[in-house]
Amino acid sequence: MQIIEHSVLGTRSAVLRLRRPGSRLEFLVFPMLHVASPAFYAAVTKRLRECDLLVVEGVSGRSAVGSALTLTYRAMPANRRSGLVTDPIPYASLGVEVLNPDVSAEEFAQGWRAMPLRYRLQMWLVIPFVMVMQFFGGTRRLLSPEIEMSDLPSATDERYADHEFTEHAERAFGGERDERLLAALSELIGTRSAERIDVAVVYGAGHVPAIVRGLFELHGYRPRAAEWLTVLER
C-alpha cells in the first residue's frame, strides 16, 4: 500500500480511510510531511474541518534535541526560492475537538539520552550537514523517488534493519510515541465505536505503517479507500 508517491507530476500523500465491520467509527489517516507546498496544507485543513475528532502529533514543550532536529527541515523553507512552508495548520482553531497523545519534551529527551553516547554524538555532528543539504536541495529531495513510502520496508530499510543505530533511533523517536497513539485510538474504539464519526489521525508519514498495522492487528481495521493530496507539484 503506497503512502507517499513520487511520479513525473510530483509528490502525493494518500489519505487513508480505515473501516471495520461492526463499528461505525472510521479513521482518516493523514500522512504528513514537516515541509510541503502551502496548497497541500490548505487541502489537509479543508478535510480536517469536516472530521469529528482530530488525533494530532506534537511533542509538547521544548527540548534542545527537539529544537535541533526541527532545524533540519526548517532549513528547506528558509530558502525562499523553494516555495515550501512548514506545517501552518492551526489545529486547535479548526472548530473540531483535538486529542494529542504524544510524549512531552522531557520524555522525548529521556528517549534521546537512552541512546548510546556515540550515536548521539554522530547525530549532533551530522545535523549541520543535513541543514545545508536541505537548504540547497530540499525541493529536489521532495520530488525524488527516495521520498516514496509504503507499508512495506524499502530496500534501504531492510539493509539497515538490524543495525544497532537503527534500533536505538526507532526506539527513541518512534516506538513509545506509536504505542501511545495506538493506546489512544484503542480507547476511542472502545468508547465511541457505536457513533458514526470520522476520526482524523494526523501524524508524520513515517508513523503511518505502524498506525495501519496496529489498527489491523489490534482491532481489524483495514484501509478501504484513499484520496491523493499533492504535496508538491513538479
Image: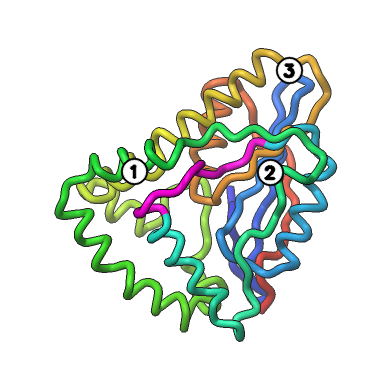
- Label 1 belongs to which residue? 109
Tell me the SS state at disc 2: strand
Image height check: is 104 above or below 34? above
Dot 1 and dot 2 residues touching (CB under 8 Å): no
Q: Residue 10 at x, y = what percent?
A: 65, 73
Distance of label 1 from label 2 (alpha carbons): 31 Å
* Camera-nearest label, 1 or 2: 1
Residue drawn at x 57%, y 28% as measured from the top left: 215
What residue range appears in magenta? 55-66
User: Image check: 200 left or right of 176?
Assistant: right
Distance of label 3 from label 1 (alpha carbons): 35 Å
Residue drawn at x 74%, y 42% as measured from the top left: 225
- Label 2 belongs to which residue? 16
Residue 58 is covered by the magenta coloring: yes
> In terms of depth relative to the viewer, which is nearer, 172 or 149?
172
Residue drawn at x 27%, y 54% as measured from the top left: 160
Q: Residue 77 at x, y = what percent?
A: 57, 74
User: Image check: 203 left or right of 19?
Assistant: left
- Label 3 belongs to which residue? 193
Task: Please tell me which of labels 3 and 2 falls first in the chain.
Answer: 2
> In terms of depth relative to the viewer, which is nearer, 151 or 189?
189
Image height check: is 99 above or below 3? above
| Location of residue 167 (image quadrant) | top left
Indicate the colouring scheme. rainbow
User: Image check: 191 left or right of 153?
Assistant: right
What amino acid is at disc 2?
A: Leu
